Image (cartoon, rainbow, N blue to C red):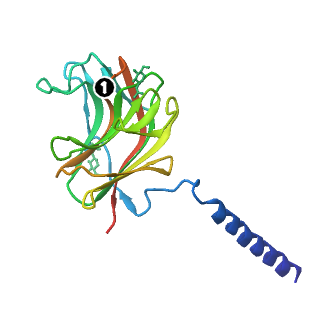
Amino acid sequence: MSTFLFSKAKYLSTIIHLIILSHGSSASEPVDPTQGFVSLPLNRSYYHIQKPYDVPEDRRYSFCDGVHKCWVYSTDKPHTRTSRTKPCTEIAIQGYGYSSGTWQFEGYGYVPAGTSGVCVMQVFGASPPHSTTFMLRVYNGSLMYYRRTVLVDQIYDKWFRLNVIHNVDGSKVKVYIDGHLKLEADGRGGTSHAFKCGVYAQDDDSFYMESRWRGLQVLKKNH
Ligand SMILES: *[C@@H]1O[C@H](CO)[C@@H](O)[C@H](O)[C@H]1NC(C)=O
Ligand SMILES: *[C@@H]1O[C@H](CO)[C@@H](O)[C@H](O)[C@H]1NC(C)=O
């Protein structure tokens, strides 16, 4: 009898605890944006490193203890001899080029203090005159959507979880930082897309630019 009463009391307290939890989970609780998505295999068969064409890869990229580190200098050459783009060192996941469906990039990123005027993650491909659907940039310690909207004020020297969801058919991009929805933006057309992360110099770029990445995943929505 007493055992019965005890387990009943425990059951009730569990219910009360769950009610409190669900009330506390309003705006401030992080969500897992990967729910409903399937993670795809990802290894070097699916990506390559874009880096200044005249230096060896290991002078601008390293992969150590599960951490990808990409760096580039504002005075570096573009990634091909004929390209006229600014310098970049990027993990280009072109093995998962896509043109329809809903795709997601997940990664834990880190940007050291001083790195500025740089794109650290992009959804490549759009309708001309654009060439990207989404850019995550860093200016003076702020994480920004292009140079338009601040997503996080102080991003230097800490790891953050990034989830970028690109619904191609619905032409929408959703961005989560640390499980919080920070941006919903329109797509910019285009028929061929790929995710890239690393450093790609933009305007007012610092001399040295670096970002680190771990836990990279490409996911696709289940239908
Ligand atoms: C990468 O993963 C694919 C799919 O699992 C596999 O077929 C391929 O051999 C792997 N490549 C390397 C370089 O590990
Ligand atoms: C970053 O700081 C520099 C120097 O103070 C300034 O010129 C530049 O406009 C700033 N950039 C942004 C996006 O605020």
Where residue 62 sits, quadrant-wise, is: top left
Vertical comparison of 2 with 219: above or below:
below
Return the residue nearer the eye: 94 or 32: 32
Write the residue at 20% across / 51% down: 189
Task: Answer few, some or many: residues within 10 Å of disc 1's Cα (few below 14, many 20 plus, some between 14 and 19).
Answer: few
Q: Amino acid at mark 1?
A: Asp
Residue 178 horizontal/vertical position (percent) = 51, 46
Residue in view at x 21 percent, y 19 percent: 77
Q: Residue furthest right?
A: 2
Q: Residue furthest bottom?
A: 1
Residue 113 % position (x, y): 48, 24
In this rendering, position of residue 112 left or right of residue 98: right
Q: Quadrant of the C terminus?
A: bottom left
For disc 1, the marked residue is: 203
Nearer-the-camera pick, 129 or 63: 129
* Picture residue at 20% right of the left edge, 40% below the top: 131
Kindly state the secondary structure of the residue where label 1 is placed. Answer: loop
* Residue 166 seen from this side: no
Mark 1 beta carbon near ligand 2 (under 8 Å): no
Residue in front for this viewpoint, 84 or 182? 182
Residue 28 higher or lower than 114, as above or below:
below
Does residue 151 show up? yes
How many numbered circles does the render carry?
1
* Residue displayed at 37% across by 23% down: 209
Quadrant for residue 53, please give it: top left
Residue that sits furthest to the left in the current view: 82
Q: Position of residue 35 (x, y in %)?
A: 44, 61
Locate residue 114: give its quadrant: top left
Quarter of the figure that contains the N terminus: bottom right
Left/right of residue 15 with respect to residue 74 in the rendered view: right
